[in-house]
Amino acid sequence: MIKVLIWGVGGKMGGNVLDGLSAFDGIQAVGGVDRFADPAKFDVPVFASGKDVNIDADVIIDFSRPDALEEILEYALSRNTGIMLATTGYSPEQQKAIDEASEKIPVFQSSNMSLGVNLLIELCRKAADFLGANYEIEIIEQHHDQKVDSPSGTAISIANAINEEFDNSKEFVYGRHDKNCRRTKEEIGIHAVRGGTIVGKHDVMFIGKDEVITIAHEAQSRAVFAQGAIRAAIFISSKKNGKYNMRDLLA
């Protein structure tokens, strides 16, 4: 039985992971970490911080916030526990710490756990390769009004994937609110919308002369991200160390 510790168990995504585990065989939650959660409302032990955790786990599923990373890495490295990171908005220094940790433990990191979103990313790679430099590219991402980071980690992942097809020659331009000049062919525009209860929507527009091709994905429930996270946790539970992502899981 794979034992899972859910970081951010009191949040919307943490709750979806906890509920979603019942649909999978051979894996179960043994606890959670959340400084804001009421432990009495859970069927598993919930701790206020990583330093309070007194149980062992095989894998951490993290849907918390970037400021929890230090505690997560400290726990995981001290107990040789794999990590499934779905949190976004890490600083370059934090990302370096994640990469260094992957040399000792298995680390699965993805900005979006939806299988559909990762299919969208692959389709965007193919579109960029096929359409080439004659088409201008704009990415519009939409999320609920409680999302902290902007633009979304998924939008950045999409932009990075497209940019790889152009040998990373494109410049990312965010919103254009401070620009007073015409768009150049070397840009990828990235725009963020926040409001209401939008779970997550990404539109990638390839804009050419007299036509627009849009590749889009909309998540209608957080359950799709929870299912992907659980599958990722199962995937790395048998790994010794290394850095993994959704492309590895899909392969």
Image: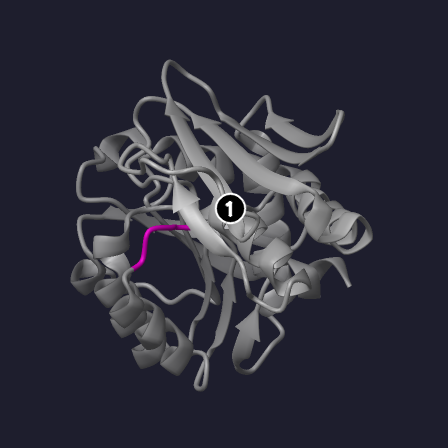
- One can see residue 21 in this view: no
User: Left or right: where does residue 210 sit relative to residue 22?
Assistant: right
Q: Residue at x 46, y 26 (%)?
A: 142
Residue 7 covered by magenta stretch: no
Percent x, y of residue 189: 48, 40
Q: Residue at x 59, y 53 (%)?
A: 27
Which stretch did the figure color magenta?
Answer: 86-90
Instruction: Tell me if residue 223 comes above or below residue 60 in the rendering.
Output: above
Question: Can you name the residue that lies furthest to the bottom here?
Answer: 103
Q: Residue at x 49, y 31 (%)?
A: 141
Instruction: Tell me if residue 199 comes above or below residue 65 in the rendering.
Output: above
Q: Magenta span: helix, strand or loop, mainly?
A: loop
Percent x, y of residue 158: 58, 49
The residue at which mark 1 appears reads as: 184
- Depth order, front residue of 205/157: 205
User: Left or right: where does residue 67 sit relative to residue 147?
Assistant: left
Question: Can you name the residue that lies furthest to the top here?
Answer: 196
- Depth order, front residue of 171/141: 171
Q: Quadrant of residue 167?
A: bottom right
Q: Quadrant of residue 44?
A: top left
- One can see residue 205 in this view: yes
Question: Can you name the residue that lies furthest to the right here?
Answer: 130
Task: Indicate the colouring scheme.
Answer: one colour
- Depth order, front residue of 178/73: 178
- Depth order, front residue of 130/1: 130
Residue 88 covered by magenta stretch: yes
Instruction: Tell me if residue 22 comes above or below residue 97 in the rendering.
Output: above
Q: Residues within 10 Å of mark 1 (few under 14, many from 20)?
A: few
Work out which quarter of the rendered image holds the C terminus and state it: bottom right
Work out which quarter of the rendered image holds the N terminus and state it: bottom right
- In what element is the residue under mark 1? loop
Percent x, y of residue 111: 49, 50
